[in-house]
Image (cartoon, rainbow, N blue to C red):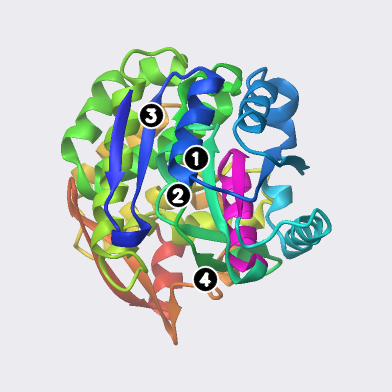
Amino acid sequence: MITIPVPLGQRAYDVRIGAFAPDDVASALATAIGTASGVAVLVDSQVGQVSPRVAPLVAALAARFTRVRRRDLPAGEACKNLGEIQNTTEWLAAEGFDRGAVVVAIGGGAASDHAGFAAAIYLRGVRFAICPTTLLAMVDASVGGKTGVDLGAGKNLVGAFHQPRAVVADLAFLATLPARERIAGLAEVVKAGLIADAALFERLEAEGAEIAASADAPALEAIIAAAVQVKVDVVTEDEHESGRRAILNFGHTVGHAVESASGYDLLHGEAVSLGMVAALSLGVSLGITPAALSERARMLLARLGLPVDVQRRLTSDVIARIDVDKKRRGQSVRFVLLNALGASALHEIALDDLRRRLAAA
């Protein structure tokens, strides 16, 4: 097991990574939560159906808390909308959960976002904890306190900052994760290496293909921990994205636009892969990113099985969605670009210039 502290003062918590028995997960959550008047367990319905670990985990929580209720959410991105948030908060109220209650998410990034946002707004805020079940959620969505849901205009346009009380990443959940989703999760690991950890990127070049091929790869735990550490370091410095935390958005401006324009047929990690390719090309065109680094990153993404064919996907609909991206400021968009491997910076790019450069990417 690897434990990574997230030192945020009164909002501090630990991220635990390893292969755990359900009883051990429940014990770790109970220790972090302490006293609770009730526990609302929100489960991604697909995970609940395919993973034999969910029911024992809920039962182990029920053995530690006096009042545990389970609600299954629509699978994946289908739970990330205001209608489903209303359904959950109405359920919380109908079940009589008060401010002493805790919400526990079991699922991927969408379920984590849903649970965290519901916890942030129910009764003006109750505690929550996360058991991420996908690689992407383990390395990204479960850490840092960003919670949110989508609007028709784009992804994550409604949300709040609400830190969890604990994150327990049980690698055993990855055994039932489809290969496509495991590979998609690697995009966020590549991102962490590109923006802040050259050694992680180089390790992916050496061992990434093995990790993409198997959920039992020996290096997986250490690679997840390294990606989490990158995010923790950034979030600790800038919790509410007033400055450096924005580098975690590398690849996400175009990525979110491509993802939402696809009707979420693309997985988030696949869209981020495409967005990173676009950001790398943009950096090259501006004379900021070395062309050799752009090609090296593109080759790694392709070798991992991630899509890199962003140019054909830059439709007028995608460009229009960039115009409503939450990182837009007036007539410019704040883009994360790479100066070198492991070194990133923020750049304001005028929308007209951005559209022209993306069209020529």
Give the Cα distance between marks 3 and 2.
15 Å
Tell us which disc is closer to us: 4 or 3. Answer: 3
- Please identify the dominant SS of the magenta region: helix
Query: What is the number of the mark on residue 17?
Result: 3
Tell us which disc is closer to us: 3 or 2. Answer: 2
Q: Which residues are magenta?
A: 101-122
Q: Is residue 122 above or below residue 289?
A: below
Residue type, label 4: Asp
Horizontal and vertical percent position of residue 171: 46, 22
Residue type, label 1: Ala
Q: Which residue is mark 1?
A: 137
- From the viewer's side, name the closer residue of 198 and 55: 55
At x 28%, y 43%, the residue is: 5
Give the Cα distance between marks 1 and 4.
22 Å
Q: Which residue is mark 4?
A: 325
Return the disc, 1 or 3, that comes first in the chain's sequence: 3
Return the disc, 1 or 2, that comes first in the chain's sequence: 1
Image quadrant containing the C terminus:
bottom left
